[in-house]
Image (tube, grey):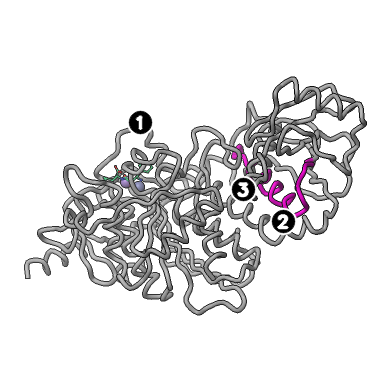
């Protein structure tokens, strides 16, 4: 009886959505909506190198490969080889040597990929080249000791490595790159086909994810996130998009998701993008991303230092839609549904208070003891919704969930929590193949004891000490049926890069797009 009335009052605190705010409050206005990042180099494949381009040679050891199709005189070859020897260049993965003054070549850049390079190592060599040539004022040719299919790998690496988010800079702009990048090989048509079949759309997915996460919170909020995603998917085959606004979510009883956003004038949304490729199984894999477009901590306000970073607290949501875009645009034979749980976590007279109890659409109750542990709240409802609506055969959550995972794994791995061994293994394999690596973390059932609430089914934190990332994972898992294979990826340490690595320029990384794309392709 007591619980019942508590719940009733909790529901009543879910006040109606505030009247639509003036455009100046919620809209962009400040910056032109049309601002675009500087142009990327177009990717092409050819049998012979265009004249006047900077030349990149991907090397597997110290020896210069034959380089058919590249106009390099015997004397020039010798000069390059002599310089490589003098510099001790050995073709190790990640090594580079930049040479100028050889013949009429504006620049010759040697990039190491290591002996018998994997697809990933070749991509990383391509990415390294893109970053070294960020301000190169000439077109670029890439050649090397690789076959035509591998040229597509290198092209992919170049494409994700050249990403930049500079659309709001009007002074001190980096020199935009000039000209295209051409990969030279014996069978350019085969290379082009390999690139188009898989990598081109993956680049589109990564770019979408990075753009969404890099955008500040005055530009990307739940409603504008949805609009951007609709735009990105326009014309993509086999796609259906479903959006729930706050009224629809209230009607369904999604109290924990709506509760998180109720301190913000920007209405919450649940976005589901379903892509079904030809001939695929009925039950999709569900990717469910945390989409907090800004996490101030709510009434449990975060300290000011670094709070700006919380514009990226929707990185999980950005990555699930990026992966779906890649799969759809490449017409992959997979069936996925990407769900973004979108809300802005703000302090306000209408915000929920620590101690408030809300319930999810299935009727389970959560005692919210800290408004800054909001990711698990939005994911609780999103997971229940996707299970009820799409009957998925597996659910993978991806979320910037805890500071605790940053302390444990820093920027090297995302934390993997899983109740299903097969799903865990598939995710670990996809991580290794894509270069977005995971480290398995524990979900011991005894940890869950700490989340027991005296007055509700569960509380959202365990006051005092505890294994924070595991508790967060348990809190989410509480809302997923034990019979459904489920995993959760905590990407709080890897969604943002302080410094560039070959495939990931500084800034928001798009972590998860490549991984989930790989997982989906591996598991149909
Ligand atoms: N979005 C944060 C987690 C986060 C921290 C992401 C650092 C990226 C970098 C999350 O909502 C949060 O605030 N988590 C709290 C949970 C705590 C209150 C139990 C945290 O980790 O401190
Ligand atoms: Zn958060
Ligand atoms: Mn938080």
Of the residues under marks 3 and 2, which one precedes in the sequence?
3
Q: Which residues are magenta?
A: 142-167
Say few, some or many: other residues with alpha carbon within 10 Å of mark 2 (under 14 / 14 to 19 / 20 or more).
many
Q: Which residue is mark 1?
A: 305
Q: Which residue is mark 3?
A: 120
Which quadrant holds residue 269?
A: bottom left
Q: Which mark is residue 195?
A: 2
Say few, some or many: other residues with alpha carbon within 10 Å of mark 1 (under 14 / 14 to 19 / 20 or more).
few
Foreground pick, 178 / 219: 178
Asked if labels 2 and 1 touch by Cβ distance under 8 angstroms, the answer is no
Callout 1 secondary element: loop
Callout 3 secondary element: helix
Q: CA distance from mark 3 to mark 2?
A: 14 Å
Callout 2 secondary element: helix
Image quadrant of ligand 1 equals top left
- Residue 89: in magenta span: no
Where residue 361 appears, as percent x and y from the top left, is: 29, 70
Q: Residue furthest left?
A: 1
Quadrant of the image for the C terminus?
bottom right
Which quadrant holds residue 178?
A: top right
Position of 404 compared to 110: left or right? left
Say few, some or many: other residues with alpha carbon within 10 Å of mark 3 (under 14 / 14 to 19 / 20 or more).
many
- Residue 159: in magenta span: yes
- Residue 114 in view here: yes
Q: CA distance from mark 3 to mark 1?
A: 36 Å
């Amino acid at each position: 009886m007591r619980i019942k009335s508590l719940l009733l009052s909790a529901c009543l605190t879910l006040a109606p959505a505030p009247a639509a705010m003036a455009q100046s409050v919620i809209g962009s206005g400040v910056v032109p909506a049309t601002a675009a990042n500087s142009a990327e180099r177009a990717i092409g494949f050819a049998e012979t190198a265009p004249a006047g381009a900077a030349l990149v040679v991907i090397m597997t050891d110290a020896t210069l490969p034959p380089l058919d199709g590249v106009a390099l005189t015997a004397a020039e070859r010798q000069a390059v080889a002599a310089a490589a020897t003098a510099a001790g260049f050995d073709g190790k993965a990640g090594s580079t040597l930049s040479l100028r003054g050889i013949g009429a070549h504006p620049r010759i850049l040697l990039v190491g990929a290591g002996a018998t390079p994997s697809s990933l190592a070749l991509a990383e060599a391509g990415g390294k080249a893109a970053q070294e040539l960020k301000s190169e004022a000439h077109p670029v040719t890439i050649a090397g000791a690789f076959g035509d299919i591998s040229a597509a790998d290198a092209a992919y690496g170049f494409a994700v490595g050249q990403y930049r988010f500079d659309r709001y800079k009007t002074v001190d702009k980096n020199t935009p790159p000039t000209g295209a990048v051409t990969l030279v090989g014996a069978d350019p048509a085969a290379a082009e086909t390999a690139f188009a079949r898989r990598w081109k759309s993956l680049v589109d997915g990564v770019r979408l994810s990075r753009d969404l996460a890099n955008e500040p919170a005055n530009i990307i909020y739940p409603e504008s996130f949805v609009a951007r995603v609709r735009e990105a998917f326009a014309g993509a085959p086999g796609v259906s998009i479903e959006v729930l606004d706050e009224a629809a979510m209230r009607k369904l009883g999604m109290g924990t998701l709506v509760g998180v956003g109720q301190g913000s004038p920007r209405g919450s949304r649940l976005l589901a993008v379903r892509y079904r490729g030809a001939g695929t199984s009925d039950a999709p894999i569900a990717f469910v991303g945390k989409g907090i477009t800004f996490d101030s901590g709510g009434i449990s306000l975060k300290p000011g230092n670094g709070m700006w970073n919380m514009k990226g607290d929707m990185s999980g949501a950005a990555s699930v839609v990026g992966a779906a875009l890649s799969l759809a645009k490449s017409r992959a034979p997979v069936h996925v549904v990407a769900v973004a749980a979108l809300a802005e976590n703000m302090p306000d007279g209408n915000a929920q208070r620590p101690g408030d109890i809300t319930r999810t659409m299935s009727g389970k109750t959560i005692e919210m003891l800290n408004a800054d542990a909001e990711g698990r709240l939005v994911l609780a409802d999103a997971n229940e919704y996707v299970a009820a609506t799409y009957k998925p055969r597996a659910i993978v959550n991806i979320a910037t969930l805890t500071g605790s995972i940053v302390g444990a794994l820093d920027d090297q791995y995302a934390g993997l929590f899983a109740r299903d061994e097969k799903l865990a293994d598939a995710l670990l394999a996809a991580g290794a193949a894509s270069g977005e690596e995971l480290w398995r973390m524990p979900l011991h059932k005894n940890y869950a004891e700490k989340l027991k609430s005296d007055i509700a089914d569960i509380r959202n934190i365990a006051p005092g000490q505890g294994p924070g990332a595991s508790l967060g994972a348990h809190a989410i898992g509480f809302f997923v049926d034990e019979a459904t294979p489920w995993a959760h990826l905590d990407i709080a340490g890897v969604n943002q890069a302080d410094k560039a690595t070959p495939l990931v320029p500084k800034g928001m990384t798009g972590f998860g797009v490549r991984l989930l794309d790989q997982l989906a392709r591996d598991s149909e």
